[in-house]
Amino acid sequence: MKNFILLSLLLISPVLMGQSSFTFLGDVVAPGSKRHWTIPISSTQDSTVIPITIFHGTKSGPVLGITAGVHGYEYAPIMAGQKLIERINPQELSGTVILVQIANLGSFLGRSPYVNPMDDKNLNRVFPGSADGTITERIAHFISEEVIGRSTHFIDMHSGDAPEDLVAYVGYYQNDNMPEVSKIGKSMAMAAGYDYIIEFRTTDKDYLKEGNLSLYCSAEAFKRGLPAMDFECGRLGIIEPHLIEKITYGVERILIELKMAEGELDASPSQLFFPERAYVSSDFEGIFYPLKKSGDYVSKGMHVGYVTDFFGKHIQEVYAPETGVVLFILGTPPVNRGESLIGIGISSR
Ligand SMILES: [Zn+2]
């Protein structure tokens, strides 16, 4: 695929230290430099672009793939990606970072939660995508082949989407048949320094089998044998600088953990692991009234919210299905039948 547009060559290292160049889509990134691309993606119906930055270090090391904006209304990770342009110094980097700035530009520019308005598909439900599918499927295919396919480790960065009040957490993929890869993913997740860590257990899902679709971006990376994790940080489509920094700093800590950057990681504070989660969905369309916030601790049976019809009549009372921490709760009034109202991280039963 050679039809990319090269935007700029920002830095050239005078000190090569024996590190060879990194080739991306037929073009070269010199050691100690970073480079931006705007990749055109077209289907028979639509066209879009994917902005990508590659940082290539002066020493050899892992290739860390990072995606932001798989959901284009999730702003904190996208703005963290913008900060990383200056915060990752290729002169001091060992290895390579491939940073997808905004994977789903249609969703971002269209201010569209969950889906790309061009084809109404959720990019994080179509992996590994398709070379001849709709525009969203082709974006997934490009990321699978050219970003995940080039990486040795992988991070997908998300937040609560437009209506979601979400507490900051990270998640990593785990499978009993892949103990080493799972362990490295866990160490990456722990290094991010977040209080809450979710384990995406894939043992029973069978998705590692040939022919089963990964659906999720980081699940595709894990299926290909890469340690893979997600950030979930930010909420409700609002800009909160401390949460943007929390993602940026988390990525910097992971670079240290992977020995791609110099530095010492202080011992992580006490971290709570959630091997399981519980959800409650709405049985109706209507108006949701949350009685709790993300990060609240709830015990099983606690009244956490209710749904009314459009005339104020209560039609569903919502109770915590388990004891645990509210990972997210719907934070805006509209609710459709079948949508998740609340998600709870369960540390133990
Ligand atoms: Zn998301």
Image (spheres, helix red, strand yellow):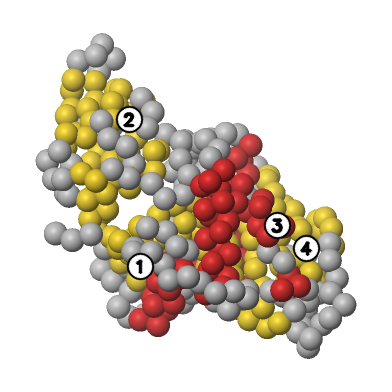
Q: Measure the C-alpha gap from mark 2 to mark 4.
A: 43 Å
Name the spot of residue 23 as percent of width and height, x first. Answer: 75, 74
Q: Secondary structure at mark 1?
A: loop
Q: Which residue is mark 2?
A: 336
Q: Secondary structure at mark 2?
A: loop
Marks 3 and 2, the one that precedes in the sequence = 3
Marks 2 and 1, the one that precedes in the sequence = 1
Q: Foreground mark, 3 or 1?
A: 3
Q: Foreground mark, 3 or 2?
A: 3
Residue type beneath disc 3: Ile
Name the spot of residue 53 as percent of width and height, x first. Answer: 71, 60
Other-residue count near label 3 (Cα within 10 Å), few / some / many at <14 / 14–19 / ≥20: some
Q: Which residue is mark 4?
A: 35
Residue type beneath disc 2: Asn
For the residues labelled 2 and 4, say whether their Cβ atoms are less than 8 Å apart: no
Q: Is residue 115 above or below residue 325?
A: above
Q: Which residue is mark 3?
A: 85
Q: Which residue is mark 1?
A: 207
For the residues labelled 1 and 4, say whether their Cβ atoms are less than 8 Å apart: no
Question: Residue drawn 64% across and 61% down?
Answer: 99
Residue type beneath disc 1: Tyr
Residue type beneath disc 4: Arg
Q: Measure the C-alpha gap from mark 3 to mark 2.
A: 38 Å
Query: Which part of the image, by quadrant, shows the C terminus?
Result: bottom left
Marks 4 and 3, the one that precedes in the sequence = 4
Name the spot of residue 341 as percent of width and height, x first. Answer: 29, 37
Query: Which part of the image, by quadrant, shows the N terminus?
Result: bottom right
Quadrant hosting residue 204: bottom left
For the residues labelled 2 and 1, say whether their Cβ atoms are less than 8 Å apart: no
Marks 2 and 4, the one that precedes in the sequence = 4
